[in-house]
Image: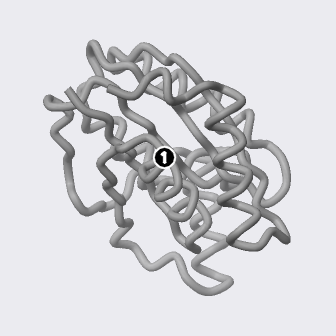
Amino acid sequence: MATLILYYSQRGTTDLVAKTLAKNLDGHLLRIHDLKNRDGLTNRLFATISAFREEKTEIRPAKVDLTNYDTIYLGSPTWSGSPTPAIITLIDRCNFTGKDVVLFATMDANRGDSNLRRLQEKVKMRGARVIECFTIATKNKSPQQLVNDTEAIIEMKDLKMYKR
């Protein structure tokens, strides 16, 4: 069995964290794309409201088969203290039964913990066993700082222990 790093990223910071995880943990990488335009001030405002309300959206891929993976890393930016609509939609379409899940949230400010709590509730309802969670603050950090922070969390939380 293998490890999958499954995530959504709008601006690239969650993408960088996910790629750092994949590189250090020999995991497969799969980025979820929100087909709704989330760019621009107005769209960003509506996206934040959609996240808070846990509204669904159209995503690509529409569904992910987790059969060949035993450990899933699931990552989302934090919007209004909540997971993104793309990740909420994905969770509702996946079967996490028997899967070990590590949740991660990126955040500009704070409230990443509320994002993680909601992600944890959602994946547990879909059969997952959450084995670890972490947040990464991204505001005013260079790409190298984000890589360093991610690698420090890998070491601190001993995430290589879950590598298969």
Image: 54 above or below 3: below
Image: 108 above or below 93: below
Closer to the camera in the image, 77 or 39: 77
Residue 109 position within the rendered picture, expressed as x and y whole percent measured from the top left? 84, 55
Residue shown at the point (53%, 21%) measured from the top left: 121
User: Seen in the image, is 99 located left or right of residue 158?
Assistant: left
Residue 45 position within the rendered picture, expressed as x and y whole percent measured from the top left? 67, 71
Residue shown at the point (66%, 55%) measured from the top left: 79
Residue shown at the point (36%, 37%) measured from the top left: 91
Residue 50 position within the rendered picture, expressed as x and y whole percent measured from the top left? 55, 57
Residue 159 position within the rendered picture, expressed as x and y whole percent measured from the top left? 55, 29
Amino acid type at image mark 1: Asn
Residue shown at the point (51%, 46%) measured from the top left: 75
Which residue in the protein does label 1 denote? 24
User: Seen in the image, is 153 located left or right of residue 160?
Assistant: right
Q: Quadrant of residue 60?
A: bottom left
Q: Quadrant of the C terminus?
A: top left
Q: SS of the residue at dot 1?
A: helix
Closer to the camera in the image, 82 or 99: 99
Q: What is the crowding at mark 1: few (fewer than 14 residues within 10 Å), some, or many (at least 20)?
A: some
Image: 116 above or below 20: above
Q: Residue furthest bottom?
A: 40
Closer to the camera in the image, 56 or 79: 79
Image: 17 above or below 81: below
